[in-house]
Amino acid sequence: MDTIIFSILMVFLSIVLFLQGLFVNRLSNNGIIFGVRVPAEFRKDEDIQKLENEYKKIYLLSIFPTIVIVNFLVYLYPKVYIFLLLTFLLIFLTNLPVLIFWKRMIDLKKEKKWDKLGKNIVVVDTSIRKPKNKKDIKGIKNKTFLILLIVPIITLIITFISYDRIPDVFPTHYNGKGIPDSFAIKNSFSGFIYLILLPIIQALMILFFMVINKFAINGKTDINSGSIREIREQRKVFKKYNSIFLFLLALEMIILFSFIQFCMIYGWSINIINGISLTIIFASIIIFTIVTYKIGQGGKNIKVSNAEKEIYRDDDKYWILGSFYYNKKDPSLFIEKRIGIGWDVNIGNPIGMTIMIVPFVLIFIMIIVLGILGV
């Protein structure tokens, strides 16, 4: 069972990373080619087209075999620490061609003297972040996420109503084969904690998604390429879809946790519940990926008719390797990703640097511990 689970997860992750790398410019922010900002009138330049064609050929020839090898290794060695190590390796390798062509795009930009065209201007439009009119609201309000608290409350009520049906010794954890491998005594303090633990985790998860939704709606908007009107309309649609996806994902996750709780109470098969729930979550992510591919990062593929002149400000100096935003003078903590879909942190901000580094350190420590334990 462990082999099947790890293999399915790696195949899914491989498909997402492969498509993200193959269509890197399609999924990048407006005006960005391989992590480099290019003026609108030169984005169809013949040399850029040649560079993109060459990139796709190299990417297909190098990354596809790599993905096959990584998935084969996961199948042969279904261990958690090996899965995590290979996941990091795959993320690095699928981004390596992007970094190589970022350097080539930087050189092409200098050769064409496009780096001399940027204007030193700053444009602020607070209506993009905090609209004054209700019709300009771009997504689901944070308060709406609180409605989801109904799920853990109902789960908790059902748990106590069904308390007599819970075995005196009930399972608290299942292994990869769906067999209980850890138990708790119902009438003990630890048993009580286990019975309320999942509803508490559900509530914390809702708060977590609320925070993400807040940043998704109010995060700093990139207004270095395109007109103000165009950016405003595109961001409204983009942030709306992001917010809806976060709400649906939060709903699916907390329902999954409720079913796990019911498996503990009523003895349902955890494998069937996990299989159905994970299928729904994966399907949601695939649908969201397709939608975001069509609308583009920041909604750049949404056509908006306007006669305004494009705002062009060359800000490449703030992006390390075209991917990591570093600007000590910018108070923003989160900013739209330059390459890919979503949001990046400003690592020029001490808090942003912490957010960037701490998870990697914790995962690295976990890999070492799991490797020592042979898990």
Image (tube, rainbow, N blue to C red):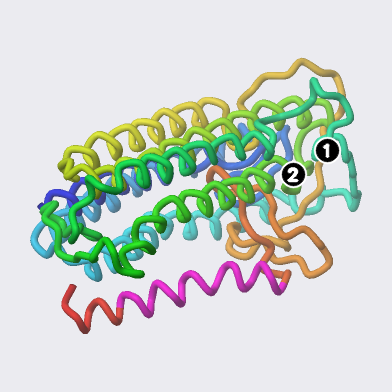
Q: Which mark is residue 177?
A: none
Name the residue rendered at 62%, 46% in the picture: 210
Name the residue rendered at 46%, 77% in the picture: 361
In the rendered image of this protein, does residue 219 appear above or below residue 286?
below
Magenta-highlighted residues: 350-367
Q: Secondary structure at mark 1?
A: loop
Residues at discs 1 and 2 in contact (Cβ within 8 Å)? yes
Name the residue rendered at 22%, 45% in the picture: 165
Q: Earlier in the sequence, mark 1 or mark 2?
A: 1
Q: Which mark is residue 130?
A: 1
Tell me where residue 91 appears, x and y as whole percent.
38, 58
Would you say 168 lies left or right of 22 here? left
Which is more toward the observer, 290 or 22? 290
Identify the residue at the far bottom of this view: 372
Tell me where residue 132 appears, x and y as whole percent.
89, 30
Tell me where residue 66 appears, x and y as whole percent.
24, 55
> Is residue 350 visible to the viewer in this orientation of the structure?
yes
Q: Which mark is residue 218?
A: 2
Screen quadrant of the C terminus: bottom left
Would you say 286 lies left or right of 115 here? left
